Amino acid sequence: MAILRDIDRSQNFDDTDFSASFTFVSEKPEEEASIFKARMFRRDNEDKFVLVFLEPPIQQGQGYLQVDENLWFYDPESRKFTHSSLRENLEDSEARNSDLRQSSLATDYEVATADIGTLGRYQVHIIELAATHDEVSFPGVKLWVRTDNNLVLKVENYSLSGRLMRSDYFPNYVRVEDRLVASRALYVDELRPGERTQMTLTDTSLATLPDSVFTKSYLERVNR
């Protein structure tokens, strides 16, 4: 579907490297909000990303390295790498590791239904998707996409049985050259009332990154 390809194109950087800073604020009932910050580096044409935690101090230097379908987590205290999964939650938040990699809606899903409706003051495409393989974080996805520019405003993520697992909201976008990238996202856990994570993106850059950034040795030395 052309809309899915357009969403992927807008969110991906196949012709350049991409880096940005992220702040995650995670809220849980009767708990103090937890905040962590990270710097991400992406090279989409090689399907690689690196995420390095900056705050809080107890997590500084921890990070992830993804190359193709392999994802490793590095702990500088033990100086060990362990295999992780793109489906896993990012730290103790509602965001998942897969939320930070390049978008692949057009290849991971097929359209089940498509309609036109409204969301707030916007006319939107309402598109239900079914996964084409079992490597995705959510087997079922429902999108609300603006009809004028194909920006995603809302996403509902479903289990294989059709249970709503998480709702995502994208109220703000920032222009990065010829693309519009979500600069703020809200991930709401639909299974645990009151649990949500807000993600804010800043300091975007398309500067070319050294090849050495996308290696285990980079994570090992970044905190020295």
Image (cartoon, grey):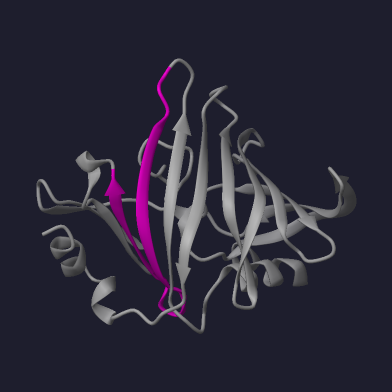
Nearest the camera: 135 or 154? 154
Horizontal relation, residue 208 to residue 199: left or right: left
> What is the x, y in percent for residue 171?
68, 48
Image quarter in which the C terminus is found: bottom left
Nearer to us in this view, 119 or 102: 119
- Asked if residue 44 lies in the magenta stretch, the reply is yes
Report x, y in % for residue 95: 48, 44
Residue 213 or 86: which is nearer the viewer? 213
> Mainly helix, strand or loop, the magenta region?
strand
Residue at the spot 60% in from the left edge and 41% down from the top edge: 160
Whether 42 is drawn above or below 83: the answer is below
Left or right: residue 216 versus residue 32 is left
Counting from the top left corner in percent of width and height, residue 8 is at 62, 69
Q: Which residue is located at x 59 percent, y 39 percent? A: 159
Q: Is residue 10 magenta?
A: no
User: Magenta segment, which residues?
Assistant: 31-55
Q: Is residue 6 above or below residue 54?
A: below
Is residue 1 visible in the rendered structure shown here?
A: no
* Residue 66 visible within the image: yes
Instruction: Specify the quadrant of the image occupied by residue 30.
Output: top left
**Quick check: 213 left or right of 149?**
left
- Residue at 76 percent across and 64 percent down: it is 150
Specify the quadrant of the image occupied by residue 56.
Answer: top left
Specify the quadrant that holds the N terminus: bottom right
Measured along the vertical axis of the image, is residue 68 above or below residue 170?
below
